[in-house]
Amino acid sequence: MKLCRFKNNSGPVRVGLVVDDSTLLDLTPAGVNQMHPLLESNDPVSQLNQMAKQNLPRLALSEARLGAPVERQEVWAAGVTYLRSKAARMEESDFSATAYDKVYEAERPELFFKALAEKVVGTGETVGIRRDARWNVPEPELALVLNSHGKIVGHTIGNDMSSRDLEGENLLYLPQAKIYRHSCALGPWIQLGVTEATAREWKIRMEIRRKGKSVFAGETSVGQIKRRFDELAGYLFRSQVFPHGAVLLTGTGIVPPDTFTLREQDEIRIEITGIGALRNPVAVV
Ligand code: DO4
Ligand code: MG
């Protein structure tokens, strides 16, 4: 069941249900103006199934402008959860290599703040590459949608845009490598009601196109994430509260070759089977 935020021609952002690959149900007449109460409820899927039986306005998905499926949640990210990510970071940095090696094996995961909800971009919107960095990549990641109790209520697609030269120069530059304008994309919607076992069967694919030609394509599987989702969520909620819930990116397992850097106007497409596809053009910020 796919829950989205959208705008039609005019008016405020609405909440909708994507019922097949091309149709959206507007949940406004069912009294749903925000995703938050649904995400906090015990059984959002049953509630939405009931609502979907009502005679709700339908519109073509192609006519709606989808917004990032996030309202007031903080967005956080886990790092070095795939062997591929550990290897790539150890290569990019001489003096941080040990840190990446250790955190992959450690009991406590790497977790870092990524974005405020209002700064997240949705599908179709521009993601940024820093003008003061020379090695910039997308990081395609499964994102867990957590309610205020830390329960995983849904999954979406995330892009943890990163500047590898800054990150590799000094670990203390990580916030600058990771948190800047348009550095986080989420979307196109939240897939509700899926267990971790099912999500672990999903594939993650990324393609980057430049002037209409494919310049990078890669694939991994969610099953290769080293840590359990409830372990990551549990650490995030330790000694912390998220009254509006949180979104947690689970780390990247697709890393383009070291010779690759993004350029303005590149097009990034990230697909997670079982969710859909997140598409973003690139701009220098
Ligand atoms: O510490 C570096 C960041 C790791 C990361 O973002 C990832 O593995 O996805
Ligand atoms: Mg990442």
Image (spheres, rainbow, N blue to C red):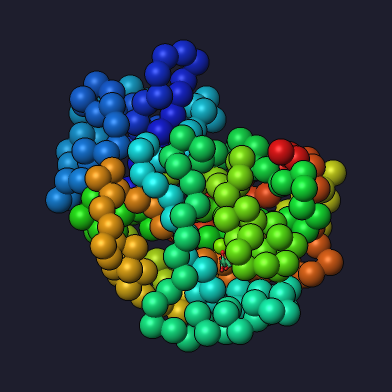
Question: In the image, is 28 to the left or to the right of 212?
Answer: left
* Quarter placement of the C terminus: top right
Question: In terms of depth relative to the viewer, which is nearer, 56 or 93?
Answer: 93
**Is 169 rendered above or below residue 138?**
below
| Residue at screen point 21% across, 26% down | 30
| Residue at screen point 29% across, 31% down | 34
Residue 222: in sight, yes or no? no
Residue 176: in sight, yes or no? yes
| Residue at screen point 17% across, 46% down | 41
Measured from the top left, where is residue 138 in percent x and y? 66, 56
**Is 199 rendered above or below residue 191?**
below
Question: In terms of depth relative to the viewer, which is nearer, 117 or 208?
Answer: 117
Q: Quadrant of ligand 1?
A: bottom right
Q: In the displayed orientation, state which residue is furthest to the left.
A: 42
Question: In the image, is 207 to the left or to the right of 116?
Answer: right
Question: In terms of depth relative to the viewer, which is nearer, 234 or 273?
Answer: 234
Label count reads 0
Measured from the top left, where is residue 249 in percent x and y? 46, 59
| Residue at screen point 21% across, 38% down | 37
Question: In the image, is 37 to the left or to the right of 165?
Answer: left
